[in-house]
Structure formats: C-alpha cells, structure tokens
Amino acid sequence: METFNTFSNTSFRPRESLSMGAQLHRLLRTAIIECDLVPGQAISEIEMSKRFSISRQPVREAFIKLGEERLIEVLPQRGTYVRKISVREVLDARHLREIIEISIVREVTLKHDDVLIGNLRQLITRQQNVNLGDSRAFLALDEEFHRSLALHAGREYAWRIAEGIKAQMNRVRFLSFDAATPMPQLIAEHTEIVNCIESGDPDLAEQKMESHLRKLITSLPIVAERYPEYFVDD
Amino acid sequence: METFNTFSNTSFRPRESLSMGAQLHRLLRTAIIECDLVPGQAISEIEMSKRFSISRQPVREAFIKLGEERLIEVLPQRGTYVRKISVREVLDARHLREIIEISIVREVTLKHDDVLIGNLRQLITRQQNVNLGDSRAFLALDEEFHRSLALHAGREYAWRIAEGIKAQMNRVRFLSFDAATPMPQLIAEHTEIVNCIESGDPDLAEQKMESHLRKLITSLPIVAERYPEYFVDD
DNA sequence: CCTTGGATACTTGTATCCTAGCATCCAATA
DNA sequence: TATTGGATGCTAGGATACAAGTATCCAAGG
C-alpha cells in the first residue's frame, strides 16, 4: 500500500455539493500529474476504495473520467494502469494548446485591461517567491497565470477544453522542473508576455507566447531520456 | 414513454468489446444531437434502464459522460435534464473549432496528398446524392469530410478534442437544416475548399474554411428564434 | 525439459438494494 | 384566505453482491 507518498495522508471530508467520485477524480488527477502515481503503475478499483474507505462505485466513476482524459487505461477484466506518456500525444496536445493560447493572448492584448495586467504582475511576484524545487507550487501559479489570460478574454469554454488537453503536458512539465526547464527562465518569459500585453503589441505578444510554449518541445526529449520507463515509444 | 421517436426501436445487441454504458452513451448522444431528446426534457436513470432493459449502473455512467460533454445536466436528488442550448457556449465552441480546423486545413494544403483529394471529392459526391431533408445522412457525411482532413493532417488527437467541442454545435446544425442553411450551399463550399487544397494555396484554403465555418454565426440566431424553447438566454 | 490444462485469485462489468435530499400535494391551523 | 408542516413519491449517490473474463501458477503428462 505504500506506493503512494504525497496523497497518502489525504482523506475525504464530505465536502459540500461535490460527489465522492468527483472528489476522487480530482485527487487522482493531481496524483498522476505529479507522478505520485507513476506511469505504468497498476491501480485497481478495490485498492482505491479501501484506501479512501469508500465503495467501488465512486472509484469507478473517477476511473472512467480519468480514462477519458487518457491519464489511465481501463482494461476490462484485466486491470487499470496509469498510462505511460506518449511523446506524440504530448506534442499534439502542445500544438493544440499553442493555437488556443495564442488566440487568447492576442485577444487580451487588444483589450488593454489594466486590472488584468495588475493581476498578472502580482502572480509573477508570487512565482518569484516560490522556493526553488517546489514544483507543485510553481506549477499551480503557472496554471493560474495562463488561466487568468483565458478568463479575461472571456474564453471560459476554451479554457475548460484546454485544461483537459494540458493534463498530459503537465506530467511532462512536472518532471521537467527537475531536469530541464529552470523556473527563473519561465518567470522571465511570463514577464515578457505581460510587457507585450501592456504595450498593446499583439504580434509580439503572440511571438513571446509561442516561444514560451515551445520550450516544452526541447525539454520533452530530455525528460523522455531521463525517465525512459515512464514513456511509451510510438 | 412515447417521448422518443427515432431511437425508440433501437435496442442493444451485446456488441463485442463495448460496455453497455459506452453503447448507451453513444446512442443518447446521437439522440440529443438529433433532438430526439429535446432540450429541457427530463430524463432519468430508471426510465432509461427500463427502456433498454439494463440496470441503472450503465445508465449512470452514460449520464456522467453526457454531463461532462454538457449535453445533459445532472442535478443530485432532483433529476437530469437535456441541457438547453446556450448561444454563448455554441459561439465559443465554434470559435475553438475554427482555430483548430484552420490550422488543419493549412497543414493538409501544404502536403499535396492526392489520395486525400480523391477521398474528399468522393465524399462530396456522396453528399450530393443525399436526399434533400435527410439531415442525419448529410450531417454524418459532413462530419466525415472534416474528419478526413484532420486525420490526413495526422491530428487524431486534435480531432478527438474537436469531436467533443462539436457536440453542442451539431445540435444547432441539425436544427438549422430545416431553417437556415441549405445543403447545396454547404456542398459548394466543401468543393471550394478541396479546390484550394488541390491548388496548394493555404491562405485561400484558410479563408474558404473560415467562411464555411462562420456560416453558423448567421444561422444561429435564426434557429434560436425559431426554437426559442430549446435555448437558454445568457 | 517442455507443453498443457485446470484451479485459483485477481480484475472490471452489471444488477440490486439502501440512503439521503428535494418537490409536490394536502390537510391542519392561524 | 393564507401559511405552514408533514406525508409521499420522486430523484441521484453510494454500498454491496454477483457475473464473467483474464493472468498466473502448478502439477500432470508427453
């Protein structure tokens, strides 16, 4: 049972208006992205139901959702496994994210929203205060940075889709903090993007965002080489 | 029980390697898109389980998936309803689809794939042979047309995402065949797009695709006015 | 030594039952 | 008449039992 580390002490409180299945889904999702559940690892409905003292039913629902997000693979009558990372799938997801976020950054740049600029700079400050090596905290703030852009552009819908897309990528990004992409550089890129938005230059903002998002392309092979057992070759 | 029409005679065969929940999900998805289950209509797990002679469990799983696709709304302890169509959500979905499909049509235009061109022209011929008024058949062929583009661009992943996005739109499109968009015009637009791909002009192909996809913007208010009870105002 | 067949212990899929919360109706009451 | 409170019947959420398929191990037989 000691295959878990981070979320091993987590337990459910009967949080208002959120089903057990939905709660478990979020918990497992984070656990997979943060590699507390490593790619290739076998999990089972019974195991999880015992682990969190609930029945198989909500676990099943969580598994189904995770399966649709391609974070796990449910094989009937055989078992359920955390999906290994597919380089091809990550690159496809990245490509999709790029065209979505570029569209978004162009929109907000044309809006000249001072409140947004302030929020973004505040987020960057918080990113600078994150302890080096606290990948979880930084990843969360990074998410919030990009989410702010989407919401200020009025693209809640697009963001909801993007969140699903990014699950795959975030596994790589989480691993890459130890291996490839230094946090200070990402912060610098965020700053550049905000500067472009503030100066109202959509083309430059697009260019900076594109460059920012394409960093994953170079870090991906590094991560794949460092953690070959987490990847499936395709 | 006679609220259904088209799929009322449908029943399950124990199709190999596809769970009842997954089968029911596909069935209900189509039924909702084709307005056999109309927006606002109440459905229930028990009703469907009786209807198809299965237990509530697979129905539940199908409902959860449909809920994530925003095709139904599950209200705990109250009931489950076919979601009314949100103009805003449809427009957001359309926008997302546009940036995805434009990216795709640019890619395939640069590829000069003769096999693809042949397939597309064949699909257009089949579209021309569809009986006027057979919205189902045409919508299916239209889907296949756009899917061919995506797959030939090697964007299976993007297409999978796009499919989810398009569920909302397709409800509108299905209604619009009776009210707004004539099939021959859509076929002409498809032909233009293929011509642009064949001549290798990505900019023009993009422009034609954009124009093609933006037809929904003009037909949407017409449909919304014609079927006000199917829409929620936001 | 290699193959084969079955017992066994898993897995997920499905069915059924129980629980808890919400809506409605209707009678009792001010 | 208007309000209130409870009985009732609905809903979905969760727990549990059973069914069916798969992998593994191991012993019997060539």
Image (cartoon, coloured by chain):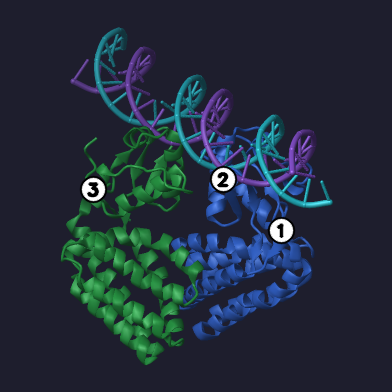
Chain colours: A blue, B green, C cyan, D purple
Q: Quadrant of the C terminus of chain A?
A: bottom right
Residue under label 3: B6
Which of these two is toward me, D25 or B27?
Answer: D25
Local crowd size for mark 2, using a 10 Å CA cut-off: few (<14), some (14–19), many (≥20): few
Q: Residue at x 34, y 32 (%)?
A: B50
Image quarter for residue A232? bottom right
Instruction: Answer above or below: position of B48 versus A39.
Output: above
Local crowd size for mark 3, using a 10 Å CA cut-off: few (<14), some (14–19), many (≥20): few
Could you tell me the amino acid type at mark 1?
Arg
Which of these two is toward me, A121 or B73?
Answer: B73
Q: Position of residue A91 (x, y in %)?
A: 59, 72
Residue under label 2: A76
Could you tell me the amino acid type at mark 3?
Thr
Q: Residue at x 56, y 52 (%)?
A: A67
Judged from the image, the secondary structure of the residue bearing numbered disc 3 is helix
* Side of A212 relative to A105 (left or right): right
Q: Position of residue B34 (x, y in %)?
A: 27, 54
Q: Nearer the viewer, mark 1 or mark 2?
A: 2
Q: Position of residue A135 (x, y in %)?
A: 74, 61
